[in-house]
Image (cartoon, coloured by chain):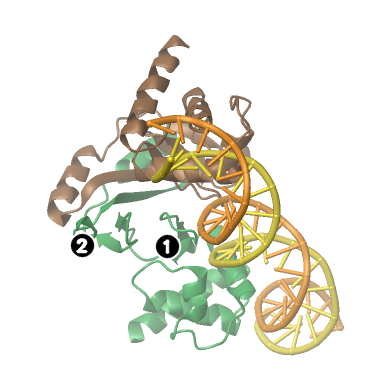
Chain colours: A green, B brown, C yellow, D orange
Amino acid sequence: MHQSSVNLEALLDSCAEAGLRRTNALRACLKVFLASDQPLTLQEIGASPELDVDCDPATVYRLVTRLEEHRIVRRIGFHSRAAHYCLRESAHQDYLICRDCGSVEILDIACPVEHLEKQIASESGFKDLDHELEFYGRCVTCQS
Amino acid sequence: MHQSSVNLEALLDSCAEAGLRRTNALRACLKVFLASDQPLTLQEIGASPELDVDCDPATVYRLVTRLEEHRIVRRIGFHSRAAHYCLRESAHQDYLICRDCGSVEILDIACPVEHLEKQIASESGFKDLDHELEFYGRCVTCQS
DNA sequence: TTAGATGCAAACGATTTGCGCGGAA
DNA sequence: TTCCGCGCAAATCGTTTGCATCTAA
């Protein structure tokens, strides 16, 4: 809890550097991110009990979009209609998703493409490289 | 050309096995997939010059959805609003995408997570495992 | 003949945007 | 004070679905 308030201030500093103001909505959204161990949709952020200020969906959208532009937040596709987001400062995670029920498991593996990323960056000239790795399958429950 | 008509028949066979009828719309959509080297959105399929029969968007949607369920087609998220699809029979591809202009490059690399996939399958009990790997960054053009 | 496929049109849901007010710098 | 951020509401866009008709099997 103290830890997360430390993180919160650090995050707000990053946001300020990126040109965002220290508004209540921003603080509230960041807290929601810090309180969650899973990627969240915009709706989930707006409906989270951790959200201590009411935020309009448009506000959440604009905030998270800007956070993503400034690489404070990472976007994750999954195969759901809504995009998911998580803090980039958290350790990079790869996911295992059930095609049928949509459950999301966080994989406890060393990410296997770290060095590949550097190689691709240098070969392609791309900057700020990042990656997304997900496994899709049918989970045990959905196999019956 | 002859090659792709061979593929087309083989694909139609797979579809028939999966319970789909050999309709003109199905044939047309499969041809579009075969003619493209990049993943396509439903819109792109419907608007493709390779599509030799007019198909309603709803038809394309239902066809591709069914093809995906039967694992004849693979869905790819990218970070665009619309989902992309490609034939699963083509070799598995990983992608390099520009966050700014959205350009998609196909990575010419041996996929680095094949064996990891098997390991995850056995550890998790998931069936029909598949994965999606994309790299995101800013391309050379967009860096200026 | 008949179950499945298609077109049309309407519903849906997740963004995405315009605008006028309010609050951070 | 000034400009950015916010809520509200409307527009967009990519699906997604209901229904009557058509067609492959």
A112 to the left or right of A21: left
Question: Residue B141: x, y in percent?
Answer: 61, 36
* Residue B87 vertical placement versus B62 (above, below): above
Residue type indicated by callout 1: Arg
Q: In the rendering, at what x and y percent does residue A43 appear?
A: 51, 73
Q: Which image quarter holds the N terminus of chain A?
A: bottom left
How many neighbours does mark 1 have within 10 angstroms: few (below 14), some (14-19), or many (20 or more)? Answer: some
Badge 2, how many Cα within 10 Å: few under 14, some, many 20+?
A: few
- Give the residue at x 53% y 81%: A27
Residue type at the position of mark 2 = Thr
Q: Considering depth in this image, is A124 or B93 the residue closer to the camera?
A: B93
Tell which circle, 2 or 1, labels the residue nearer the N-terminal end. 1
Residue B24 or residue A106, whichever sits in front: B24
Q: Secondary structure at mark 1?
A: loop
Residue B117 x, y percent position in the rendering: 22, 44
Vertical placement of A79 versus B89: above or below?
A: below
Q: Provide the chain ID for the residue under circle 1.
A: A
- Which residue is labeled 2 in the image? A141
Q: How many marks?
A: 2
Where is mark 1, residue-wise?
A: A88
